[in-house]
Image (spheres, coloured by chain):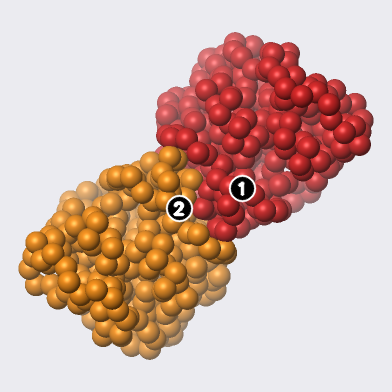
Chain colours: A orange, B red
Amino acid sequence: MDSTLPMRLAIDEAWKYQGLTFPNPAVGCTVVDEHGKILAIAAHQKAGGAHAEVLALQQAYAVLNEHSAILELTDSFKIHNFLLEYHNHCFEKCTLYVTLEPCAHVGKTPSCAGLIQSLGIENVVIAHSDPNDKASGGAERLRKSGVYVEEGVCEEEAHALLQPFITWQAKTYLTFKWAQRLDGTIDGGTISALESRIFVHKMRSVSDLLVIGGNTVREDRPTLDARLVNGKAPDILILSHLTDFDETIPLFSVPERNVFIDSTLEHISNYKNVLIEGGPGMFESIKTDVDSYLCFVAPKSGGTIPFTKTKEDFKIIRTLSSGDDQLLWMR
Amino acid sequence: MDSTLPMRLAIDEAWKYQGLTFPNPAVGCTVVDEHGKILAIAAHQKAGGAHAEVLALQQAYAVLNEHSAILELTDSFKIHNFLLEYHNHCFEKCTLYVTLEPCAHVGKTPSCAGLIQSLGIENVVIAHSDPNDKASGGAERLRKSGVYVEEGVCEEEAHALLQPFITWQAKTYLTFKWAQRLDGTIDGGTISALESRIFVHKMRSVSDLLVIGGNTVREDRPTLDARLVNGKAPDILILSHLTDFDETIPLFSVPERNVFIDSTLEHISNYKNVLIEGGPGMFESIKTDVDSYLCFVAPKSGGTIPFTKTKEDFKIIRTLSSGDDQLLWMR
């Protein structure tokens, strides 16, 4: 059996939450017991929530101790404390496969390197080092405390997973999202499955600015909030040369939201994580600035307006199922 | 950890060979040791080649005995005989996860149920029973010989994997294949990645008839053989009202091939596994008869002719990466 299987499964799990973990990276973790049995696979889901290592160790604890009460804990500190108090050396012979170097930094959650050390875990396999100075040093800390650390397993795949995080350390991150049918068309009513729409609402809830075209606002009269997940609605930039909009369009009435109407993208530089939900015109004007393309493809045909009219060459980074749709992360 | 992981990995592996195993079903197998460690994952690749169980046990033997010479064997009988002679009870505590009931029938290859029994494997987990009367009875045979057999794990996913096989037991199987860009267009030079074209040549080599439109033949002057994989070229049905074709078009010169020119699909009933490589017109005329749609999507845009002009509603059964493309199996 390919010894990279646990790491590949951790990477697969992490991709399910790509786009949702901002400002944190998408990270996955697999716990394997002393005999090579996979006990748990988990991923970081949301900033402020438990890290992948903590969630995977929580699941592994439940398996090793046939104790499901631990699974009721959701707060990262509480899971940490439970594990520290009750681990009874059960993890010592386990190997932790983690797509990113465990953090050495106590932030919103306790340090994962510290937890691993306290639990006495003897082996840690890391795909990619931490590019964030503040949190890095985890591997060194583990080695100093006697943990056997292997680095660079599936590093290339882990780098692709980490790319958005690396980019938003340095600049405002721009994700261009659209939904189309298999025939490339975008007109004529709802295209995406409910699961895809929920995913977009989750992305909106971690974006600080949503960019939309003036025509779309006039024609669709959208709300552009995160109501499907009870999330915070992002600010809005309506990209438009005309500034006269019907103020009864729902997006203007969402509480605690700023709405800008501008013919330029200057406002973007005041934000960190920007979601662009544009049509063909917006795509043309912004495509060279975009960091990630997120395309939902519904397995249908029958519209009349294509999304792209120009020659484009994307690179598919990852695809996932999203209800009946396919979700494509592209560059 | 979800106890269905080994079965899901077997199903994933089997899908890589969907469309290539005719007249056999696509089948996957995972071998897990007594401690729950995954030792091997393999799939049946081609009729006449070793079954999934045999390939997985071959790999597992290499792991358990640190003996890689067995991996050089490719003939199913030779692998069987090697395992029977040298297993030394190494598999007894293993669990075999197999997507389809192991065959009880000695055909082109020896019976897998017999092999499992001879190796003394104590646990077999089966996703789906064998719908083929001739080969079925494997689970019963195993139980009678004292093997603990669990059935129905991931049965629904295994049924989707098995659907083509079930269908071609009863009727001629029609697969409609096309390659398009993400924008739905099909014109203007090579669209698919080399990996996708190789996959299609493999499919041609196990198809007995390839259906193509008259216009495509006139415009593209294709060969329509399986040269990329040194495979057998299928017979050709050119669907056309006009019977006058330039006989120097390469497809007419492929040895050991019958070419029919007809305005109806009557010839199809003389064949078992039919691949249709048509354009929009062919799609319209044949779409209600098709069993599987196989669509390669290249992450590009810029053509002018869309594949579908009508309203369609497909169901994605499975997607796979194929070089830079996505491969979609749909109904």
Q: Amino acid at mark 2?
A: Pro
Q: Nearer the viewer, residue B21 or A60?
A: B21
Q: Nearer the viewer, residue A160 or B232?
A: B232
Would you place residue B128 above or below residue A282 in this image? above
Residue A117 in the image: state x and y as whole percent.
Answer: 34, 76
At 63% from the left and 55% from the top, the residue drawn is B323
Circle 1 sits in a helix, a strand or a loop, which is it? loop
At 63% from the left and 37% from the top, the residue drawn is B279
Residue labelled with disc 2? A306
Q: Amino acid at mark 1?
A: Ile
Residue B82 quadrant? top right
Tag shown at residue A17:
none
At 70% from the left and 53% from the top, the residue drawn is B190
Q: Chain of mark 2?
A: A
Would you place residue B241 above or below residue B17 in this image? above
Q: Check whether the beta carbons of the residues at disc 1 and disc 2 lie within 8 A of each other.
A: no
Left or right of A170? Residue B254 is right
Left or right of B184? Residue A285 is left
Residue A119 in the image: state x and y as whole percent.
Answer: 31, 70
Left or right of B28? Residue A229 is left
Left or right of B116? Residue B67 is right
At 45% from the left and 53% from the top, the residue drawn is A306
Would you place residue B302 above or below residue B119 in this image? below
- What residue occupies the far top of the structure in this picture? B133
Q: Chain of mark 1?
A: B
Residue A169 in the image: state x and y as whole percent.
Answer: 37, 83
Residue B298 in the image: state x and y as whole percent.
Answer: 58, 54
> Would residue B2 be visible to someone looking at this image?
no
Residue labelled with disc 1? B186
Q: Nearer the viewer, residue A88 or A9?
A: A9
Residue A176 quadrant? bottom left
